[in-house]
Amino acid sequence: MLLILACTSVCEDLAGLERDDCLAQRIEAMSEPAEVRVEAEKIEDRIVLHAAVMTWVEAHRAADRQGLLELCGLLEHEHHTICKRRVEAAHLQ
C-alpha cells in the first residue's frame, strides 16, 4: 500500500514516458477494471497504454467481463481485437 501511495505522488510529478511508465506500474497493483480505466486514460504513449492494459487483462481474466471489454475499448486497431478475443474466449487461452 505504501508503494502505491508513493507512486501516486511520484507519477504526478513526472512527465512524458516516465509518467506513463509510473502510471503503468500503478495499474499493475489495481484490482478493478474501473480503477484501471481511470489510470489508463492518463497514459499518453500508445505502446505503454497497450502493454499496461493487455498485461492487466491477461492477469485478471476472471474479472467482470464487461469491465474487461471496456478496457479493451481503450486500445486501437489489432490490439483492440486481440484484447477482445482474449476476454471473450478466455477458456481457450
Image (tube, grey):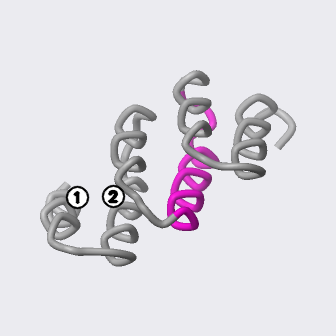
Q: Position of residue 79 (x, y in %)?
A: 71, 51
For label 1, the residue is 4
Quarter residue 20 falls in: bottom left
The three-letter code of the residue at mark 1 reads Ile
Secondary structure, magenta segment, majority class: helix
Q: Compare marks 1 and 2 and give the one earlier in the sequence.
A: 1
Task: Please give the residue where the numbered disc 2 appears in the rendered image.
Answer: 26
Q: Answer with left or right where residue 54 lies relative to residue 49.
A: right
Q: Is residue 22 above or below residue 8?
A: below
CB within 8 Å, label 1 to label 2: yes
Residue, x 77% and y 46% (percent of image)? 82
Indicate yes or no whether the magenta region holds residue 55. yes
Residue 83: image location, x then y, percent: 70, 43
Over which residues does the magenta segment extend?
46-63
Q: Position of residue 55 (x, y in %)?
A: 58, 55
Residue type, label 2: Arg
- C-alpha span from label 1 to label 2: 6 Å
Q: Is residue 45 above or below residue 66?
A: below
Q: Position of residue 51 (x, y in %)?
A: 58, 62
Question: Helix or strand or loop: what does disc 1 sit on?
Answer: helix
Q: Nearer the viewer, residue 16 or 8?
A: 16
